[in-house]
Image (spheres, helix red, strand yellow):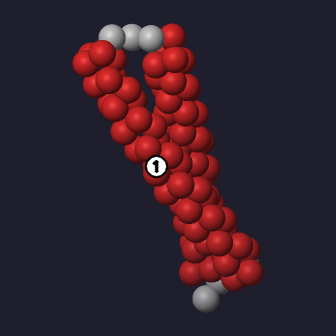
Amino acid sequence: MLTQRLQVVQEISAAQSRNLLNRQLSGGAEFDIQGIEQEIAASGCSHELARTLADARERLRKANAAMSECDAHCAALEQRLEELDRWIAAGR
């Protein structure tokens, strides 16, 4: 039972690390979007800027989707951890 608990804790840690990376990617994409939008406002929209903006928005969408997946996975793992803790406490 303790081995299972350790595995769940390690999975939670790995998922949280992935989520941190996704947050960094999301923040970078948001920063890029703001910069591109400012450039468009200052100089007008070109085909290249429009493509770059679309790419940054897609990166943001993917990072946010990955964060949602990680959040759901972490919630399930935390619930599993609570169950294991109850079983361990009941066995003492």
The residue at 51%/24% (across/down) is 52
What kind of residue is marked 1? Arg
Residue 62 as seen in the image, left or right of residue 27: right
The residue at 30%/15% (across/down) is 43
Q: How many numbered dots are placed on residues in this image?
A: 1
Disc 1 on helix, strand or loop?
A: helix
Looking at the image, residue 7 lies above or below residue 44:
below
Quadrant in the picture for residue 90: bottom right
Judging by the rendered image, the residue that carries numbered circle 1 is 23
Query: The C terminus is located in which quarter?
Result: bottom right
Query: The N terminus is located in which quarter?
Result: bottom right
Residue 35 as seen in the image, left or right of residue 53: left
Most distant residue in the front direction: 43
Q: Is residue 46 visible?
A: yes
Most distant residue in the bottom direction: 92
Query: For this rendering, which residue is in front, 6 or 31?
Result: 31
Q: Which x, y percent locates residue 16?
A: 54, 60
Query: For this rendering, which residue is in front, 62 or 34?
Result: 34
Dot 1, how many residues are within 10 Å of its Cα: few (below 14), some (14-19), or many (20+)? some
Quadrant in the picture for residue 86: bottom right
The residue at 57%/81% (across/down) is 89
Q: Is residue 61 visible?
A: no
Q: Which x, y percent locates residue 80?
A: 62, 61
The residue at 55%/25% (across/down) is 55
Q: Which x, y percent locates residue 48?
A: 52, 17
Q: Which x, y percent locates residue 75?
A: 54, 52
Looking at the image, residue 4 lies above or below residue 27:
below
